[in-house]
Image: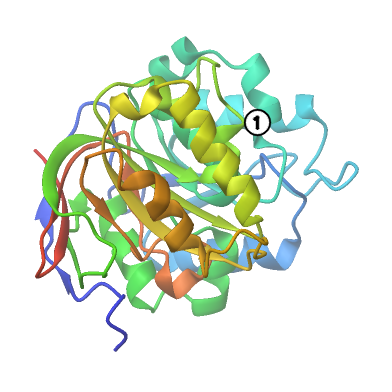
Amino acid sequence: MKKTIVISLMLCRVLSLSAQYLHEGDTIAIISPSSATDTATINGGMRTLEQWGYRCVVGPHALSDYHGFAGTVDERLADLLWALKEPTVKAIMCSRGGDGAAHLLARLSLDTLRHYPKMMIGFSDITALLCAEARAGVKGIHGSMCHALKTYEGNDTVSQTLRQMLQGNLPTYRVAPHPLNITGKAEGILVGGNMSVFNDLAGSDFDPLLMDGTILFIEDTGEEMSKVDRMLHNIEVRRLQSHIRAVVVGQFNKYKHPENGFDDMYAMLHEYLQHWHIPVCYDFPTGHAHLRNFPLLTGAKATLDVSNEAVVLRYDN
């Protein structure tokens, strides 16, 4: 077992007024707010969810293809609003990420998300919608979508942790320490996800960094180190690091090395984060590699404890 993977899961039942957890027989809507997908991916995700005891309904435009997006903005927004407003739908799983979820935010209000507080499930480009929900005070799940549920058939540890989270059984994650970790303990609202996606929300109503008292988690794939450097500088130049109580650094993969002398992404991130004087943990298992993408409940109050022995992330009642 690699030392960076979660080494213990302690499940506890947690109830919330702003997140409607699921029961056997509940209905999950599958929609495609970002890039186009295919029938096999959606059907494979449905099979796993149905094996877990849920009913599934698919958005009318979930299989549309408009210039690489899963339909026009109007079509994708219509599917999202249908899933939010349909009373029989208890949660929403996005079929895939890619690009395009942010298109919907220009036509979506925080009041709508508050009025229909349903957990949305996804990661990568779906970060835009998860951040919007967090700003509205609604919890969502940064976690696996249809492709992973189809590929692993729901039998791996990551998928099984997602299954538990859907039912309100929230994990306590215990992760091995990393040499660059900055020790300390902090409480806050867990927000974040794909760094390049939430960076593009800067200054909008949906910007998670405008929330004070947060634990920020970050991950990305395929981004140049110089671009991530600019994202960090953007946070500092807006003086928003004062809103952040702790940082959870997930997986950064497939990135390009610039000619700036840094050996890797974590070394460059540390150049900034060491000056924020808050707890920081590196190599947390969240990101674009499924078996290292354990689900995180966004918009939830959490505690991060970074010590020399371990990193512990747990959710507060």
Point 26% across, 69% down: residue: 178
Image coordinates of residue 50 in percent, x first then y, are: 45, 63
Pinpoint residue 244: horizontal percent, then vertical percent: 29, 32
Q: Residue furthest bottom?
A: 1
- Foreground: 296 or 121? 296
Rendered residue at 44%/52% (across/down): 269
Question: Relative to residue 305, is residue 232 drawn left or right?
Answer: right
Q: How is the image coloured?
A: rainbow
Q: Foreground residue, 74 or 203?
A: 203
Q: Is residue 157 above or below residue 196?
A: below
Q: Which residue is tagged 1?
A: 102
- In the rendered structure, which amino acid carries the disc numbered 1? Ala
Which quadrant would the C terminus be assigned to in this image?
top left
Residue farthest toward the front in the current orientation of the protein? 261
Where does residue 242 sit, x and y in percent of width and height?
30, 25
In the picture, measured across the screen, residue 196 lies left or right of residue 17, that is: right
Question: In what quadrant of the picture does the N terminus appear?
Answer: bottom left
Q: Check the image and report above or below for 291 versus 259.
A: below
Q: In this rendering, would 132 be left or right of 118?
A: right
Closer to the camera in the image, 24 or 317: 317
Mark yes or no: residue 215 visible: yes
Position of residue 189 relative to residue 12, above or below, is above
Is residue 116 visible in the rendered image? The answer is no
